[in-house]
Each structure stands twice: as structure tokens, then as C-alpha cells.
Amino acid sequence: MEQEKKYSFHQNLAYCVRSTRKGCPKLLFFCLLVILVNCLVPVVTAFLPKVVIEQITDGKPLRQLLLVTACLTGALALLGGLQKYMNQLIYWNKFTMNTFFLRLITRKGLTTDYRNQENEHFRKLQSESFGSCNGNFSYYAQTYDAVVLFFSNLLGFLAFAGILFTLHPLLILFLCLTTLVSFFLNRRINKWIEGTVGEKSGYEQRLRYVTEASDDLRAAKDIRLYRMVDWLNGIYDKNLKGLLGWYRSYTAKLFGVSAADSALGFLREAVTYAFLLYLALEGKISVAEFVLYFNVVAGFSAWLGSLLGQITDLQRLNQAMNRFRSYLEYPETYRREGGKPVGSLDSPERIELKDVSFRYDAEGEDVIHHFSLALEPGEHLAVVGLNGAGKTTLVKLLCGLTEPTEGTVTYNGTDIREYNREEYYRLFGAVFQDYSLLPVTIEEIVAEEEELNVDHERVETCLKQAGLWEKVSSLPEGVKSKYNRAFWDDGINLSGGETQKLLLARALYRNAPVIVLDEPTAALDPVSENRLYETYDEVMQGKTTIFISHRLASTRFCHRIVLIDHGQIAEEGTHEELLAKKGSYYELFETQAKYYRENPEGEVDHDEA
Ligand code: ADP
């Protein structure tokens, strides 16, 4: 789903002004003041020699000449100082606005529908948006400079056009025409950039991927063992070549346009200065006026060139801002305001998938296909199936992390879209395969609360239930141990299995009526795994649980097992029922069981498997 916003320049300017009024109102004042000063300085500079020459040619007394000169140069010095001071203030205050926009982006990233975070296009916009306001020379920061320059140029242009109008309107037309040709040449470059920005950011994204992989401790083992260095280097070289190629084309285009620009500039100035000389020699303008017009013509070309250049620049920034706003305004479909109350968190209600289909890619195939399943309150369901069968997707649909493409998910008989999504999430305690743990203390991780609000007894109970208490209590600082040695010098790291137990303790602490465990035993040793199965009923009593595993033997303690294949329920029943069926479950179970079997005759002992 492509979601590109196409706001015009003035719409984006209004947005920028509104945001600045909220984030840093004084920046607006500084910008307005500097625009005025930027325009006044060249006007005073252009008039100064004219006034001085007139004082001399009109034979004014020396005192008056000195006074007028001192006033004008003094005013220029003051304006120059003010200009520098304002620019410095603008520079510092742009930091405040960067932070303001970064906060908006971060918030969007943290709160957006989970489905958006899985969307490649959204992620691309997200990373571009971070770049757009990261640093004082980022796109967003440049916008302030570009807008200030644009309006300074516009005011200056109008002022100088007014002066030149008294000389000859055709002169203005000639100056405008030659400068416009340059402008349209520049515009072509801009169009080219617009058409190739996707290609460029694609190269940059893949380069970033390789750079991040080199810094990623989790990938370090695989990179070495699987000799991925050459492969990664290959990706890096290929994309660097692509990026350099892009910059080469860009520079070549820029060079061509700059050469044409210079030629036009020469023509413009030669013709206008010849005209001024003619007027002066014919006595149609005085020496003082010649000097004034001389300055004004040079200034006018500069104002206009800069003004048009600024338009090109603003168009480029406008594109960046449109991408930025496309990200911030990316549609959110989940209900966040109002909605029906989900009811009590103490006991679960019936959850049902009604003829649900889901596909990640609108043009792709269904990952979940016409799937119907009802979970009774307190039921322990096991979902098994081969890799890629759709187990995790099913769980994301149940938890409301993603929306069905067709069909509905209901909780207590109500379509979950009618609940406030944040409230709906409170029904679930989940352990996913991909997780994130903050670098805080163990008890804060389990409780997802700051130390002050932690229920210490409950933390202990949950760690015991998850089988991690022994390990944690043996640490010098116990539950106060800080997690993540990369963050804390005196922090601790946990093994894969221990992390899984910690995640389980966190899910249990939540005291949610529905517990979802996605491959919770994958990293556990056999003793820990067995312990989890033995205590499962007791720990999960009264809760609805969904236990995903590809290990069939591990699901026997569940009330019901569903075997998923290609996003559909292939078989359903208890462990014994499914074995008796002698279908796919039986075959998969046999395949796994034979590795555990000690019986040399090859007969399967189901109880041992
Ligand atoms: P399982 O948990 O059974 O291994 P998943 O539900 O993770 O299976 O995946 C089912 C199918 O959906 C797989 O073919 C997988 O490649 C695809 N898939 C999973 N996540 C995404 C995603 N974010 N974008 C596109 N396809 C995905």
C-alpha cells in the first residue's frame, strides 16, 4: 500500500510554520527579522555610493557629507552585526526543532499499527524521516535556511525590480528571461533526482544493512562460521558501485547545467552594462545614478538567480518534507480512541477466528486461508506445523497485531476491531521468538514497571514458575541485577534459554487472561523443557493458552492440538486422537520420535517420545 503525500510548497510551509509555533516560536521571529535585515543590507549598500557621490557633486558641506556617510555605514555595520547574531540564534534554535520532529517520528514508530512496521514502504519512509531531521544540516534544518533565503531574495528582488523599473521595463524583462532559462535547466536536474530517489535510497539502505551487520554481535557468529564476509562484501561493493554511479550521473548533469548558467550570466551582464554605459555617455543618467544602477543591476541578477535557485532547492526540500509527512500521516487503522470495554482481565473469554484469510502482500498468496477456530475460556491449545505453515501469523492475528485480509477475529463475541486496541493488548501475555528487553534490572524487566511500582513477591513467584529463580537469586545483586553488559559495565548477560525463561516470567507477571507462547522451548535444555511441561497446567490454570511449537511431543499436555499446513487446519484433536488418525500428525510425530526411540525393533513407544 503506497501512501505518498503530495503537499504543495505553501501547504508544507504552513505546516512548518505551525510546527515551529508549537516547537520553538521564537525561531519564527528570528527568521522574520533576518529576512528583513537580509533585504535591507543590499538596498542600503546600493544607495550608499549614490548618496555620497550626490553630496559631493551637489557641493554639500564636508560636515554633512561626513555625517551622512557615517550614518549610512553605521547603519550597515549594525545591520551586519544583527544579521550575524540572528543567524547564530537560528542555528541554535534549529536544534530544538530537530528534537521536536525527532520526537514526532519516534512516537509514530513506537505507536503505529504493528502491520505498518512490517511494511517495507513504511520502514523506508521511517528511515528517511529520521535522516530528514537528524543533525543541523539535515533536510528539515535546511528548510529553515532555504525559506529564509527565499523570502529574503523575494523582498530584495521586488525592491531592486522597483528601482530598475524607473530605468527601463524591458531591461527587467531581459534580465528575467536569461535567468529563467538557467532556472529551467536546474529544474530538469530536480526532476531527474525525483525519478531516481528510490534507486538511491535502495543502495543506501543495503549499504546500511551491511554496515549494521558488521556491528551486530548476534550476527557475528554466523558471519564467521558461514563465511558470509565475501557475500556481505559483495553486497557492499555492488551497492556502493550503484550509489557512486548515481552520484556520477548527478555530478555530470550538474556540471552541464553550471556551464550553461555561466554562459548566460556573461551575456546578461555584458548587455546590461553596455546599456548603462550608453545612457551615461548620452547624459541620460547622472554619474551617481550610473553607480546606483550599476550596483542594482548586479544585485538584481543575483537576487533573481538566487530566488529561482531557491525555488529549485525548496522543491527538493518539499519532496523530502512530503516523504516525512507521508510517514507521520501514514494511515492507522486500529482503534485507539473510545471503543467497547474488553471486560475483566481476571478471566478469559471465548476467542474465535471466523473464516479468516490473511496475506502480507496484496498481490501475494494467502498465508492464512479461510481459517476458522474457536478457543474456549481456559482452553490450552497447541498449534503445530512445519516452518512457514503460518503459526506465528495466526498468533499475530489473534493478538490483534495484524488485521485479517478477510474474515473476523472475535473476543467474547465482539469483533476485536470494536475494542480499543491498546486495551485489547492487555488481554495477552506473550513470549515471541523475536523480543526486545530494555537494559534495566531483572525485576523491572519482569514487571515492566519502574522499581518503585514492582511487586517483589510476584516477581519472585513468576521467576520461580519460569524456572529462573535459582539463577537470579544466585547473582550478587539478585533481582536487582542489571540486564545487558553492553549497556552496563556491571550488567549481566543471559543465555538463550535463560532469556526465554525471563520472557516467560514477564508474560506471567502480566497476569493476562490469555498467554501466547511462540516456540517457548526452542532454547531450553531438556530438563528445563520438561519442567515447563510438568508445571504448565498449574502455572497456566484458568488462563487460555496458545502454545506454538514444531516439537510435537511437547504439546501433549494441551487440551487440543491443531496442525497447520499452508495456513489451514490440516488436523485437529488431542494427541491421542491425532495419533490414532494416522495422518500428517502421526507421520510428523513418527519422524521426530524415531530419534528418541531406544527400541531396536523400531516400534514406536509413544510415551517415551
Ligand atoms: P511459522 O510461524 O509457521 O513458521 P509464519 O507465520 O512466520 O510461519 O510465516 C508464514 C508465511 O508467511 C511464511 O511463508 C513467511 O515467509 C511469510 N511471512 C512471515 N512474516 C512475513 C512478513 N512480515 N512479510 C511477508 N511475509 C511474511
Image (spheres, grey):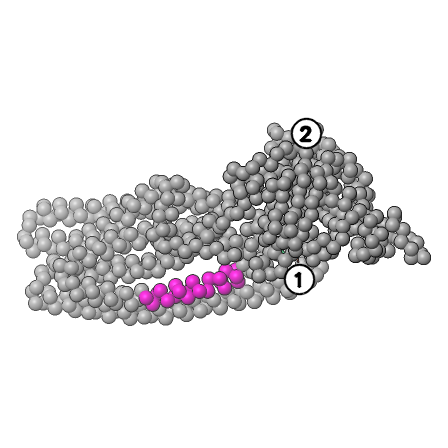
Q: Secondary structure at mark 1?
A: helix
Q: Position of residue 574 (x, y in %)?
A: 80, 47
Above or below 364: residue 536 = above
Residue at image point 20% right, 56% down: 160
Front residue of this view, candidates 597 and 28: 597
Disc assigned to residue 456: 2
Q: Position of residue 385 (x, y in %)?
A: 74, 54
Q: Is the CB–ligand 1 distance for label 1 below 8 Å?
A: no
Badge 1: how crowded within 10 Å, few (<14), some, or many (20+)? some
Pointer 1 residue: 228
Badge 2: how crowded within 10 Å, few (<14), some, or many (20+)? some
Label 1 vs label 2, nearer the camera:
2
Q: Which residues are magenta?
A: 184-204
Residue 187 is inside the magenta segment: yes
Give the quarter of the image for residue 307.
Answer: bottom left
Above or below 534: residue 53 = below
Amino acid type at image mark 1: Met
Front residue of this view, candidates 364 and 270: 364
The kind of secondary structure the magenta stretch mainly shows is helix
Q: Distance between the Cα atoms at labels 1 and 2?
A: 45 Å
Q: Position of residue 374 (x, y in %)?
A: 69, 45
Answer left or right for 172 relative to 360.
left
Q: Position of residue 568 (x, y in %)?
A: 70, 55
Residue at image point 61% right, 50% down: 407
Amino acid type at image mark 2: His
Above or below 475: residue 233 = below
Answer left or right for 364 relative to 503.
left
Residue 504 appearing in the image: no
Give the quarter of the image for residue 517.
Answer: top right
